[in-house]
């Protein structure tokens, strides 16, 4: 009897799943048809409003009310986005005039689920709604999302703030991120900062004003960004590098900064790192060896030649690369190339051969 | 005597009822959870949540190859078409006896280089290294003494420049967005040390500049078509469920992303195991759990790799035997995981599932067949009832399979022709009955053909992949 019950249970599940599959198939097809029709209607409505604007008119309140009722639903907002995206005409005046609608629907999206919230942040970014304002409820919304447990909410909010280009709010967003101890990949922050429109110096000033309060992950991202865009912070990076209590990776970025922007007072420090054979500090030696190609001199060549014999692969490799990049004369390298240390010899020879090939390729190009 | 047989058969039937109930419940859970995850991800996609795809984590793509002269060049061409900016390609020719290296060198106009290799993991020595720098990304070819796939992967890891590496097969093709999708879990969570991609049978599929050419068609070959359905049910569904609990025990060797230093910490791939892909994942779990490290091994359901499925029964049998042996070796090597609460979900759920429903399952089914025969001999079986039960059970499996298949079709926004839909429906039933039993038999005989030093790659007939 129990086995028969089991069979009936299986039959019931089979029927339910078959029904689910059929319903899902029809639902999907119907939804596509309905959404397409809705989009066409909305497109027409928007075009009519744009014509009014083109004749130096103002959008009627009835249209704003219509948008207010419609766009608070995420599905309709997506259709609205599709409709706008399909239009080639300039939408800026239209978006400017319907901005009050977004002020209201932002309040609605504060209460929605994470996926919808992330989508709304994407819309704010795409159309830069409120970007020209010093402060608005949209700014509050985006800052609020920085406390979200969803990476995608936070990321879309950051992207929107980057698009707005308001340095104060970007710094505030990172501060909020830091306060909530959420993991946010440093590449997302650093590379996202690169996309910021507006005054980069102002942004850097804002970020530096808060940098000591950031956790190392965010510090690293911010410093990487500064490294990419400005050579005006040598003293700040020198202080970081000289502070032995500073986070290891943060100090390594400082070394990379000095590779990109030559700062003579730091040269001796880099040479000391390279010459330090402490195996626990191999990263400092390796990164410094790489950076020293920007600091030509006999002392540099001497230090790099010595570090070719390091027990650490990366130190040897970077030392060889730098020696080659410094166009060190063959005579100065001959003792290594003919020496007993096979590892030093091989790696130096490889870098020399590689450099020759690069030259040949660029000449033939 | 009859009484003893009756008691025996009664116990066996109770065992099988419980066994099949647990499996059907598991199957139901995996398909419903798997489908739900797919639909949720699709929704995330449509609602522009995944705005992390323009941020590149540098990676090395390691392609171990052995006698792959037919496919290796087209595979590398497809890798150069990927929508990703920061990567390198390393083909490791594991002592091929055909023209694998020659084809690579000639087509890509490669030059010999003297790149020193940082040997972090032991492997067979290299014979030569070639490089091509005039492509979108650097392409390296390392020819080495034959040592097996695991050994070739270890060489690739030694040569790799970047902090993450992808392992893939030389007869596989990635979609243009595969790297972006497989790297997402790494961007989401700093604890992620490995990510598995989804492997789909490429038979009958056409790829144009890294994109699937639509309309999507089921393979013409019936065996390959059934494997499409099987992959969706087994690979997709169960792996998604385990993924939710950090219980993934297998990342396919055809497409997986790994944090290089983590793999080096555990000693790289084991060249003595046939199932080196599973063995590595189990070892990573053991290592991290023993060291109480925060870690995560994830599954990227939308990172797709197209790989050739065997089209002949003989090739399929060889493949499944190899997988079964690999499974056994991995589980035996890490038998300390068995019911060991120290290892949490991995031990108590994942390991037990693979032990009972994958490793021992063929023998359990064989045992079931034997008991049915015994029952028939002693006339102790209600044959119509038994047939009805088996039909319902097969139908149940078929419905779940078709649900998994369609959830994938819908979420990838693929259109399936009416002919293919009908074909899928019929093949589901066939796959859940005849093919299942055939594969059970093949797996159960895996050990009879096992020879200890068989570090072979497993030959199956290769066809040129359709790439434009």
Image: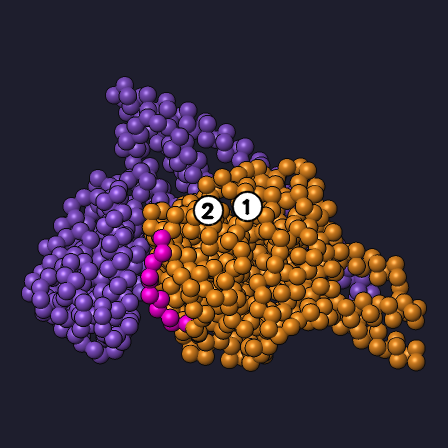
Specify whether B288 is left or right of A174: right
Which chain does the residue under circle 2 lie in? B
* Disc 1: which residue: B465
Q: Which residues are magenta?
A: B111-121
Specify whether A11 is left or right of B461: right
Quadrant housing residue B324: bottom right
The residue shown at (69%, 69%) is B449
Q: Position of residue B67 (x, y in %)?
A: 54, 57
- Which quadrant does the N terminus of chain B fall into? bottom right
* Disc 2: which residue: B78
The reply to whether discs 2 and 1 touch (Cβ–Cβ < 8 Å) is yes
The residue shown at (17%, 66%) is A333
Q: Colour of chain A?
A: purple
Instruction: In this rendered view, identify the residue nearer to me: B70 or B439.
Output: B70
Which chain does the residue under circle 1 lie in? B
Q: Colour of chain B?
A: orange
Instruction: In this rendered view, identify the residue nearer to me: A324 or A87.
Output: A324
Q: Secondary structure at mark 1?
A: loop
């Amino acid at each position: 009897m129990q086995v028969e019950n089991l069979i009936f249970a299986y039959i019931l599940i089979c029927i339910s799943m078959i029904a689910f599959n059929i319903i899902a198939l029809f639902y999907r097809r119907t939804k596509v048809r309905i959404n397409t029709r809705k989009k066409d209607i909305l497109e027409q409505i928007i075009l009519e409003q744009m014509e009014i604007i083109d004749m130096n008119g103002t959008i009627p309140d009835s249209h704003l009310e219509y948008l207010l009722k419609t766009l608070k639903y995420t599905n309709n907002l997506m259709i609205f986005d599709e409709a706008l995206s399909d239009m080639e005409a300039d939408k800026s005046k239209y978006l400017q005039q319907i901005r009050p609608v977004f002020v209201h629907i932002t309040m609605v999206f504060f209460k929605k689920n994470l996926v919808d919230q992330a989508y709304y942040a994407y819309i704010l970014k795409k159309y830069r709604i409120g970007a020209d304002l010093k402060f608005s409820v949209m700014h509050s919304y985006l800052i609020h999302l920085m406390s979200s447990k969803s990476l995608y909410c936070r990321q879309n909010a950051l992207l929107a703030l980057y698009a707005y280009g308001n340095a104060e709010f970007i710094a505030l967003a990172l501060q909020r991120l830091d306060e909530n101890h959420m993991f946010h990949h440093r590449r997302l922050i650093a590379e996202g900062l690169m996309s910021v429109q507006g005054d980069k110096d102002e942004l850097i000033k804002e970020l530096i004003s808060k940098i000591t309060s950031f956790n190392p992950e965010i510090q690293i991202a911010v410093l990487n960004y500064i490294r990419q865009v400005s050579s005006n912070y040598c003293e700040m990076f020198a202080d970081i590098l000289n502070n032995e209590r500073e986070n290891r990776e943060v100090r390594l970025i400082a070394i990379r900064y000095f590779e990109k922007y030559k700062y003579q007072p730091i040269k001796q420090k880099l040479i000391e790192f390279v010459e330090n054979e402490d195996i626990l500090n191999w990263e400092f030696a390796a990164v410094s060896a790489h950076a020293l190609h920007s600091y030509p001199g006999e002392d540099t060549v001497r230090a790099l030649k010595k570090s070719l014999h390091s027990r650490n692969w990366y130190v040897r490799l970077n030392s060889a690369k730098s020696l080659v990049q410094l166009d060190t004369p063959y005579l100065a390298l001959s003792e290594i190339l003919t020496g007993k240390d096979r590892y030093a010899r091989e790696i130096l020879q490889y870098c020399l051969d590689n450099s020759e090939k690069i030259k040949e390729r660029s000449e033939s190009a | 005597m009859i009484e003893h047989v009756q008691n025996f058969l009664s116990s066996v039937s109770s065992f099988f009822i419980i066994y099949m109930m647990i499996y059907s419940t598991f199957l139901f859970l995996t398909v419903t959870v798997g489908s739900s995850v797919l639909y949720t991800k699709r929704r995330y996609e449509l609602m522009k949540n995944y705005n992390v795809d323009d941020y590149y984590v540098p990676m090395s793509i390691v392609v171990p190859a052995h006698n792959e002269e037919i496919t290796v060049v087209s595979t590398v061409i497809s890798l150069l078409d990927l929508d990703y900016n920061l990567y390198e390609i390393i083909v490791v020719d594991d002592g091929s006896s055909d023209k694998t290296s020659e084809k690579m060198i000639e087509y890509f106009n490669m030059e010999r280089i003297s790149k020193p290799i940082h040997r972090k993991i032991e492997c067979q020595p290299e014979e030569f290294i070639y490089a091509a720098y005039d492509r979108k990304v650097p392409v390296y070819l390392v020819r080495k003494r034959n040592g097996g796939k695991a050994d070739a992967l270890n060489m690739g890891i030694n040569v790799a420049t970047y902090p993450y590496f992808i392992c893939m097969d030389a007869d596989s093709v990635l979609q243009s967005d595969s790297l972006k999708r497989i790297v997402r879990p790494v961007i989401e969570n700093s604890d992620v040390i490995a990510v598995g991609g989804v492997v789909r049978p490429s038979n009958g599929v056409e790829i144009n500049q890294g994109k699937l050419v639509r309309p999507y068609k089921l393979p013409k070959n019936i065996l390959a078509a059934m494997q499409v359905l099987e992959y969706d049910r087994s690979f997709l569904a169960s792996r998604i469920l385990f993924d939710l609990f950090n219980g993934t025990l297998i990342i396919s060797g055809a497409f997986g992303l790994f944090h290089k230093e983590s793999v080096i910490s555990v000693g790289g791939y084991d060249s003595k195991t046939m199932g080196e892909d599973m063995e590595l994942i189990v070892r990573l779990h053991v290592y991290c759990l023993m060291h109480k490290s925060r870690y995560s091994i994830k599954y990227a359901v939308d990172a797709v790799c197209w790989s050739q499925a065997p089209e002949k029964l003989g090739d399929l049998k060889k493949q499944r035997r190899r997988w079964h042996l690999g499974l056994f070796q991995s589980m035996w090597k890490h038998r300390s995981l068995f019911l060991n609460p120290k290892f949490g979900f991995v031990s108590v759920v994942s390991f037990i599932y693979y032990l009972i429903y994958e490793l021992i399952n063929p023998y359990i089914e064989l045992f079931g067949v034997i008991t049915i025969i015994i029952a028939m001999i002693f006339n102790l079986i209600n044959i119509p009832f038994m047939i009805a039960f088996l039909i319902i059970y097969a139908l149940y499996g078929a419905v779940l399979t078709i649900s998994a298949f369609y959830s994938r079709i819908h979420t990838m926004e693929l259109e399936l022709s009416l002919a293919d839909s009908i074909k899928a429906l019929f093949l589901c039933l066939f796959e859940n009955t005849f093919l299942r039993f055939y594969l059970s038999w093949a797996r159960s005989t895996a050990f009879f053909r096992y020879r200890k030093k068989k570090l072979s790659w497993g030959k199956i007939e290769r066809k040129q992949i359709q790439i434009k």
